[in-house]
Amino acid sequence: MSKKSQDAVRRFLRQDKNDAWAVRLLPRVVFGLAAAYTLFAIAAQSGSSFVTVTTLLVLGAVVWLLRRRGQLLLALGSTILTAAAVGYLSAAGENARGTASAVLTGQAVFGYWALAGMALLGAWMVKEHPGRRGVTVVLADVILVIASVIGMFAPEFGVPTGFLGLLAVLALRGGTAKALLTRLKRLWPVGRGDTKLRGRRSS
């Protein structure tokens, strides 16, 4: 054992009140061991419990790794919630109409999931995004949820409506619409000046 490790062990065992590192480390070790034992006990009960604990650990690790990237974390969270919401709404719509079909429901859900993935990719494909990328994904996901509600009553209009709404959000938030307005403003004074010159010449 190296000298640094020995010093660290001594500091931890002595628990000097003036040593902030040692005082903070003991509660963390105790609560960490208690949490690890609790998760292990829950995961050992059944296969579903093991899957649930593993999923929570993976999500916790992802949140910890992305803690400094708030927009990306917001976008991922919104995409996951939207995927769950549109799946539930699609199944509920099929059951409400009395024409429950696994094939049709699967096709609709896959379409919404593909659009949610397009929203996530479209927000990060733009190199110089004028706004916040996570907010763009949230707005697109809200449109998709609204489209899935429309799809509950009119299945043939659900995915196309979501696609058009997604394009509109990405265009407005991605700077495409702003660039077009800027070009129109640049062209408008030129055309206006040409009209004035023609009026002067005719007079």
Image (cartoon, helix red, strand yellow):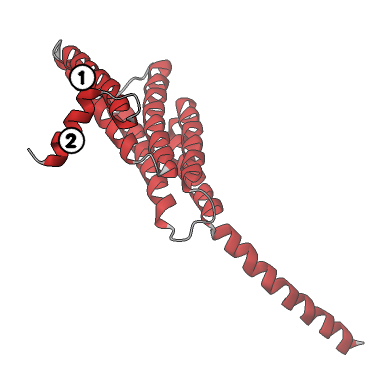
Separation (CA) of disc 2 from disc 1: 23 Å
Decide if residue 130 is on the left or right side of residue 13: right
Identify the residue position indicated by label 2 in the image.
7
Looking at the rendered image, the quarter that the C terminus falls into is bottom right
Identify the residue position indicated by label 1 in the image.
33
Report x, y in % for residue 106: 30, 30
Circle 1 crowding by C-alpha within 10 Å: few under 14, some 14–19, many from 20? few
Decide if residue 170 is on the left or right side of residue 183: left
Residue type, label 1: Leu
User: Which corner quadrant of the image does residue 85 belong to?
Assistant: top left
Circle 2 crowding by C-alpha within 10 Å: few under 14, some 14–19, many from 20? few
Please name the residue shown 20% across and 15% down the image: 49
**How many labels, in total?**
2
Please name the residue shown 68% across and 72% down the image: 186
Q: Nearer the viewer, mark 2 or mark 1?
A: 2
Circle 1: element type: helix
Mark 2 or 1 closer to N-term?
2
Check the image and report above or below for 14 versus 117.
above
